Structure formats: C-alpha cells, structure tokens
Amino acid sequence: DAGVIQSPRHEVTEMGQEVTLRCKPISGHDYLFWYRQTMMRGLELLIYFNNNVPIDDSGMPEDRFSAKMPNASFSTLKIQPSEPRDSAVYFCASGAVWAGGTGELFFGEGSRLTVL
Amino acid sequence: SQQGEEDPQALSIQEGENATMNCSYKTSINNLQWYRQNSGRGLVHLILIRSNEREKHSGRLRVTLDTSKKSSSLLITASRAADTASYFCATGKGAQKLVFGQGTRLTINP
C-alpha cells in the first residue's frame, strides 16, 4: 500500500481564498483523522470520521472549516475564506480501532498551508 | 487542552548515549502511544502500550507506563544520528480520539 496520500504538499494562497486539502486513506482503514500542527499549539485534532461518517468535529476552529468524506477512499478539508492564522501543516491520518481503544495511526506527509 | 505533556521540550545528547523522554497525562486512558516525526515529515508510530501493561520493548526502544502516576517514559538506547527527530506521546480512551502532546525535540550529536 502507498500509505496515506495528501495533496497538495504545499499551498500558498491569499487571504479570503478558498483552500481545499485532500486525503486518500489506507485501504481498509475505517477511521480517518484530520490534525493541524503549528509551533504555538502543537498537534490539534480537528475532526475524525468512522466509516465515512463524521463522529467528532469539536476541534474544528470555526464555521470557515468544513470536512467531508464522500467515500472510504477520499476526504477533503476545506477552508473558506482562508485567513493568515490558518497557516499550518494539516495532517490526515487513518487507522483502525479495536476494543482497547485507538490503534496505530498512519499519517500522511502533510499539507503545508501558507495564507498571505 | 492537550492530554499528554512531554518532558523535556528539547534534549541534545551525544551519539551512543541513551535518551529518555517523559510524558504525563491527566485522565484515565486505554493505551498510550509514542510517535516520531522527522523534520518536514508526517508522524510515524513507534510503539503502543496498553493501560494494563507496565513495560514494553521494541528494538532499541523501551516504554514504561505508570498509570498511578499518569506518566510514561520512552528510552532510546545507543542513540544514532538518525534518531534526531521530535517524539510525541499520544493518549486515547474510549472514544477513538488520539490526543498528542507538544513533543520532545531530540538532537543526536555525532
């Protein structure tokens, strides 16, 4: 398997523009997570899905952020409109969960977003 | 708020020495995991220890868990330059959320 694939790897945009980040999880994983990483706040969980259904979006910072998972092999994280404070590295991760709790997560290489 | 907090925030040692990083957390957990992140890359899973386990080994890695103190430690023995990275602990309980600490930046000097 190719692992978790994210695109784009780098995105530079201007304030007010719409940004769409994409993720292809590992086949067979039923959980998908979106994290945001910044120097100030570290790794923040934004939202996660189970079997394509959003389970917990309490980490989504504002209504400007939305995430979808139309099928088991694709998810998007959209920011509209973007602001400079959204600049961060956004990670997608997938995994399976067992009775003992969250199992190992597999991370993509991240999408580095810069909003000017 | 962050569940896991790593200590120290940064650690610099000589190649061949052992590196120890600590993680403290606040609430009860089902398991605790350690991840490594090389600069500019995604996180890579290293090891998972369940709440009913006290110690676990994987190669040069040794993880301990003390649920009474709500703490864990990661020991890397015989460090190598390639071990230079940030190390994160992550905790999970019940719901399948995995919450990460701020990480320890480890530098191995040749």
Image (tube, rainbow, N blue to C red):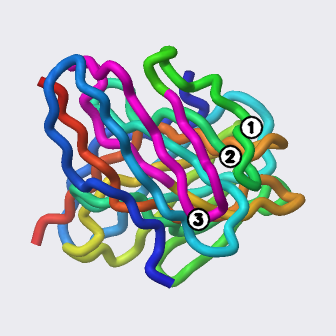
Estimate how packed mark 1 is, as few (under 14), some (14 to 19) or many (20 or more) residues with alpha carbons within 10 Å: some
Instruction: Quickly name the residue at label 3.
Output: A73
Name the amino acid, label 2. Answer: Phe
Name the amino acid, label 1. Answer: Ile
Instruction: Quickly name the residue at label 1.
Output: A55
Residue A70 drawn in magenta: yes
Task: Give the residue displayed 59% in from the left and 39% down from the top.
Answer: B99
* Chain on which label 1 sits: A
Instruction: Quickly name the residue at label 2.
Output: A49
- Image: magenta residue range: A66-92
- Say left or right for A31 vs A109: right
Instruction: Compute the Cα span from label 2 to label 3.
Output: 12 Å
Q: How many marks?
A: 3
Task: Give the residue displayed 42% in from the left and 34% down from the top.
Answer: A78
Q: Relative to B17, is B106 above or below? A: above
Viewer-nearest residue: A44 or B56: A44
- Say left or right for A108 vs B89: left
Name the amino acid, label 3. Answer: Ser
Estimate how packed mark 3 is, as few (under 14), some (14 to 19) or many (20 or more) residues with alpha carbons within 10 Å: some
Whether marks 1 and 2 lie on the same chain: yes
Q: Which percent across, then down, holds residue B80? A: 25, 76
Task: Give the residue displayed 69% in from the left and 42% down from the top.
Answer: B97
Task: Give the residue displayed 57% in from the left and 36% down from the top.
Answer: B4
Q: Are marks 1 and 2 in contact (CB under 8 Å)?
A: yes
* Chain on which label 3 sits: A
Sequence-wise, the earlier of marks 2 and 3 is 2
Q: Are marks 3 and 1 in contact (CB under 8 Å)?
A: no
Q: Relative to A90, is B44 above or below? A: below
Image quarter of residue B47: bottom right
